[in-house]
Image: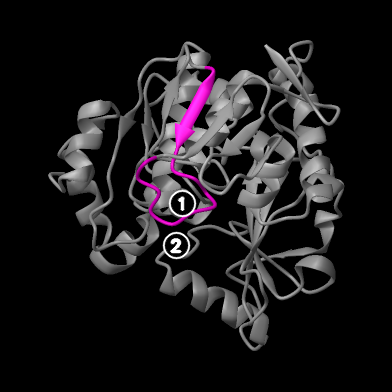
Amino acid sequence: MLQKNQNVSLSNEYITEYVQDNIPNGRLQSGGREWVAPSPFMINDYKRHFSINTISGLWQCFKTGQQGNFVDIYAHIENISKKRAYSVLTFKSLEDSPDISPVNEYPLVTSLEINYNTEVFEPLTSESDLTDPLVRDAFRYLDTRKIFPTEDAEYYICREGKYADRLIIPYRDEDGEIYYFQARALRDQQPKYLNPGIDEGVRSQNVLYPFDPTKEVIVTEGPIDAISLIKCGLNATCTNGCSVSDVQAMQLKEAPKIIMGYDNDEAGRKGLGKFDRTRKRLRMPAFGLYTLPASYKDWNDFLCKAGKGAIVEYVSKGKYSYDSFYKIRRDLNLY
């Protein structure tokens, strides 16, 4: 079912998923048409004064008296202007249209479709000039992260343009062509990580780091974590963030078993909840889960501090199933 909101049409499923992720600790009422939750305009609103209709997108805070439509609450939560919120949701409404198949409209990138001249990337090889500061910095960074190359052109550097002074982590197809990449700062640039965007002909949500779809796969947030697991002899990929899109989910569906390995933080936990709702909607089987030990922030941190053997041993002990009892174990710190 679609709703109209300042000429922005969004599905009931999208609104429900968004408010569950971003206005937590609530509950669905009125047959799933109302999300009642602590007000985002108050602190410690344990009486849940906020209500939003998941069909119309209209909401009200009964304590403060504020009310509005979905564009208004989206702008407030995302801390952006209403004009920007309207633009973002207008684009989202195109993706959400029932007349558009997300898989066909936004296919997974499997060939060189980036509108960017990757020829400016310089491969790191066994013959690279170690007197060059950028080359030295790249190799040193890879060594500190325990993902040093084992073959030529496993990584690149860039000296000019948008990705200047960055390490390039390529995503390659079966023919060895680069279809995507991540650029990691080697100086003091911000942000540390840059990915090609829609202006360069591709969306990060359509891309997965290359993996073997015939084997059980561990899904991480970023390529460095995926590479860390691959260095340990495991089959791994990444979703370029802590959210699995429909396009990525359909590609992951080919694997015999999906094991989520997102970071053990609030963003990672939200990502797991979102994927659980996505996989149910797409009629995918339940996924497994590796919960990182609390002493490590991500898989690469695990590798750097404990080594390959520790990760292999940890993984061999088994995985959890993502279900309501996992959440109980997590909340009681029993895992």
Instruction: Identify the element where label 2 is drawn.
Output: loop
Residue 154 image position (x, y, % from top left): 58, 56
Instruction: Please name the predominant secondary structure of the magenta segment in the image.
Output: loop
Q: Which residues are magenta?
A: 33-47
| Residue placed most toward the observer, 41 or 148 | 41
Name the residue tied to disc 1: 227
As shown in the figure, which amino acid type bears the numbered disc 2? Ile
Residue 251 appears anywhere in the view: yes
Instruction: Identify the element where label 1 is drawn.
Output: helix
Q: Decide whether residue 40 is among the magenta residues.
A: yes
Q: CA distance from mark 1 to mark 2?
A: 7 Å
Classify residue 175 by image quadrant. Answer: top right
Name the residue tied to disc 2: 147
Contact (CB < 8 A) between labels 1 and 2? yes
- Residue shown at 48% from the left, 59% from the top: 150
Residue 86 image position (x, y, % from top left): 81, 41
Residue 310 vs residue 159: left or right? left
As shown in the figure, which amino acid type bears the numbered disc 1? Ile
- Residue shown at 51% from the left, 15% from the top: 281
